[in-house]
Image (cartoon, grey):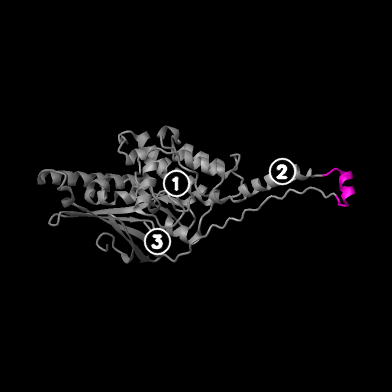
Amino acid sequence: MAGAWPGWQVEEQIGAGAFAEVYRAVREDASGQTEAAVKVVTLRRSSLRSLYPDESAVQAEFDRLKAQFSREIRVMQSLKGQTNLVSIDDCRMIDDEQSGTCTILIRMELLTPLLVDLDVHGWDEERLIRMGIGLCRGLEVCGAEHIVHRDIKPENIFVNRRGDYKLGDFGTARTLDIACEALTVREFGQWGRFSAPEVRNGQLKEANFDQAHRADLYSLGMVLYWIANGRRFPFLPDKQLFSTQERDEAERRRLAGEPLPAPETGSDAFCRVILKACAFDSADRYQSAAEFREALEGLRDGKAEEAAKPRQLARRRRWWIPAALLAVLAAAGVFLLTGWPRQPEEAAQTGTEKLPAVTTLPFSHILDPKVYAIGKPYAY
């Protein structure tokens, strides 16, 4: 670190993923202390040997991947300062011919991971709408550069101290996918959870930007669905732990195109927006990030018919609906058996007093438990 950026010191490791480790770094100068996150990615030439017949082909592909990675980083650096994208400040590539590795150091802004933010602060529909709007804006910026993400998931979403939501790992996921293929195959079941059906089914034509862009929109919609559904994917039972069979069956139903049930919580208008974003056929989804954003802004601004309905209404727990139906049926039975309500003269004959009719509507108290966890509020 000191050799790459004099004055910067690593304080602690704050994260690790399939392809990289992340550290918190600080720099002291006359203006005070500055913090940053540093991601360390190691590309290994040996990971390509199973894909290419000889060493010359392996070396050629390794060099190509390094050049592609460098280009993608430069593109993201050109987008520095965009509100809803993680800003990359600098990048260094260190080759080690003897070990056949290339270590990439990426210095970027220090942020709080979405999952930590959810654990500490909880969520509601308003927060999810605000997050969706912000991330759609980030996708709009990248769409203007014909950049697709391919790996939108909660782990790649962050928030700063002002409450701005940001997409991270933009542009690098595709290169890392190829350069670390052996590891990617093993981890695919985990990081591909939010992918669109055409991605998981191998039907996406990556040369078609519009198709790839709509796949990103699906992934964003699925992230919102997952949170609103109690951090569960569609078709999973309402519990905390799932068997492998339950997970596989839920995934099979989603990828086969079975209509998704509405998320467990959220207004009807909110659920309609999310389900459209997660439509099985990409032609039925929002066709651009701007269109998705406008739908969410409609909810935020109260333009949608049901946007003003109470937030956090648990769809699976509306126990009062059957109760109300039973009450209506009971009242009808009383009417048929007793002739109630009696006419005034009947009431007088029986010595009873006529009372005004009162309709009582049940109240639904929805408790959305929030998990409060102490975690490091740092991310990359």
> Is residue 10 left or right of 338 when viewed as pictured?
left
Q: Which residue is mark 1?
A: 135
Looking at the image, is 164 positioned above or below residue 3?
Answer: above
Q: Which of labels 1 and 2 is toward the front?
A: 2
Q: Amino acid at mark 2?
A: Ala
Looking at the image, is 271 positioned above or below residue 29?
Answer: above
State the mark number for residue 216. Answer: none
Chain part drawn in magenta: 342-353
Q: Amino acid at mark 3?
A: Tyr
Viewer-proximal residue among 366 and 330: 330
Residue at x-position 31% and y-position 34%: 205
Which residue, as the protein is rendered here, is positioned at the far front? 337
Residue 307, image quadrant: top right
Residue at x-position 26% and y-position 51%: 186
Q: Which residue is mark 2?
A: 332
Looking at the image, is 40 positioned above or below residue 174?
Answer: below
Viewer-proximal residue among 285 and 296: 285
Check if mark 1's residue and mark 2's residue have beta carbons within 8 Å: no
Residue at mark 3 to residue at mark 2: CA–CA distance = 61 Å
